[in-house]
Image (cartoon, helix red, strand yellow):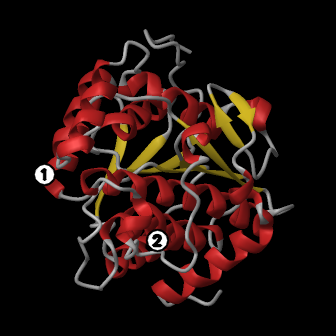
């Protein structure tokens, strides 16, 4: 097997298939490139055909033999996520599924389905996609949800009575910061979803884990930020400890592929180390309440 500059051995996972959402930029694109370099056939999920083609061209420039399948879907729309999930359930049998797609949107932004945009994209999309795939894929398989810093998220518990973030004042004093608070809540939802789905997949051969990529610059998450939010985004980009998207992809891809994690289920990892997430994400009662309310929002049985 040949060794690539980034340390991955080509054909290490030849014949295996992966699915990566948000695969057209940043961490997602870097994860696709790493998995393709390792020999996996990768389904890239992005919002538009144009951005998918552009990202695929960049990946093939780095990995000429990359085997890529491009799937477009607007992950803020439940109907499109459901259609994507059904297509993938019928046509793939992935060993790896990485949910990376995320946005930071104004709390007043709603989809045409009436769902707050950040909630729809960051939480409900992986809820529908991974639940659907979990019922169809053959074990063994690893599902990984890209989350955020457990330390930061400790201060942003999910309000189970306000998933749409309608109570703006509860998100903070400054209106320009509220989209980030709403984003933080959805990343806590991701963690709670990991634990709920992992409990349901116990002993199935399918594992579900969360992974924090680190502080990443230039992800595009905050491109519409303003005021205090814009200042925070600038501070992140100037932070000397920030990581590149490729460095950020390391932890999620490691969780998805490393042999030492065979059978490890319902855990959260930072810098390749298992960590404990805030108590409000660990409550089984809270996790189950979120599961049931999410099912109601997307029209699935709980």
**Mark nearer the viewer, 1 or 2:** 2
Q: Is residue 246 left or right of residue 205?
A: left
Q: Which residue, as the protein is rendered here, is positioned at the far left?
A: 50
Question: N-terminal of the two: label 1 or label 2?
Answer: 1
**In the rendered image of this protein, does residue 138 appear above or below residue 69?**
below
Q: Which residue is mark 2?
A: 124
Q: Which residue is mark 1?
A: 50
**Image location (x, y in percent) of residue 183:** 41, 55
Which part of the image, by quadrant, shows the C terminus?
A: bottom right
**Image location (x, y in percent) of residue 16:** 57, 44
**Image location (x, y in percent) of residue 233:** 28, 35
Residue density around tag 2, few if under 14, some if 14–19, many if 20 or more, within 10 Å: many
Q: Is residue 64 visible?
A: no
Tally the numbered discs.
2
Which part of the image, by quadrant, shows the N terminus?
A: top right
**In the rendered image of this protein, does residue 13 appear above or below residue 160?**
above
Observer-nearest residue: 167 or 28?
Answer: 167
Mark 1 to mark 2: distance in Å? 25 Å
Q: Is residue 260 left or right of residue 246?
A: right
């Amino acid at each position: 097997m040949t060794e690539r500059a980034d340390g991955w051995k080509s054909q290490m996972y030849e014949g295996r298939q992966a699915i990566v959402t948000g695969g057209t930029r940043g961490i997602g694109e870097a994860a696709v490139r790493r998995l393709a370099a390792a020999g996996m056939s990768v389904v890239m999920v992005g919002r538009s055909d144009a951005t998918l083609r552009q990202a695929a061209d960049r990946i093939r420039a780095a990995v000429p033999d990359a085997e890529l399948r491009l799937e477009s879907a607007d992950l803020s729309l439940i109907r499109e996520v459901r259609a994507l999930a059904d297509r993938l359930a019928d046509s793939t049998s992935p060993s790896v599924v990485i949910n990376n797609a995320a946005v930071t949107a104004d709390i007043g932004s709603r989809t045409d389905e009436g769902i707050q945009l950040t909630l729809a994209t960051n939480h409900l999309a992986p809820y529908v996609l991974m639940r659907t795939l979990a019922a169809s894929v053959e074990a063994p398989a690893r599902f990984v949800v890209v989350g955020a810093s457990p330390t930061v998220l400790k201060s942003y518990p999910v309000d189970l009575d306000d998933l749409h973030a309608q109570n703006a004042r509860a998100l903070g004093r400054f209106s320009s910061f509220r989209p980030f608070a709403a984003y933080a809540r959805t990343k806590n939802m991701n963690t709670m979803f990991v634990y709920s789905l992992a409990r349901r997949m116990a002993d199935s051969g399918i594992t579900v884990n969360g992974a924090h990529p680190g502080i990443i610059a230039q992800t595009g998450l905050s491109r519409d930020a303003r005021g205090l939010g814009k200042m925070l985004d600038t501070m992140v980009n100037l932070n000397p400890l920030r990581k590149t998207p490729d460095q950020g992809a390391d932890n999620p891809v490691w969780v998805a592929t490393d042999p030492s994690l065979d059978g490890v289920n319902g855990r959260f990892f930072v810098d390749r180390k298992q960590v404990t997430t805030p108590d409000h994400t660990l409550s089984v009662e809270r996790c189950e309440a979120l599961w049931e309310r999410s099912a109601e929002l997307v029209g699935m049985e709980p």
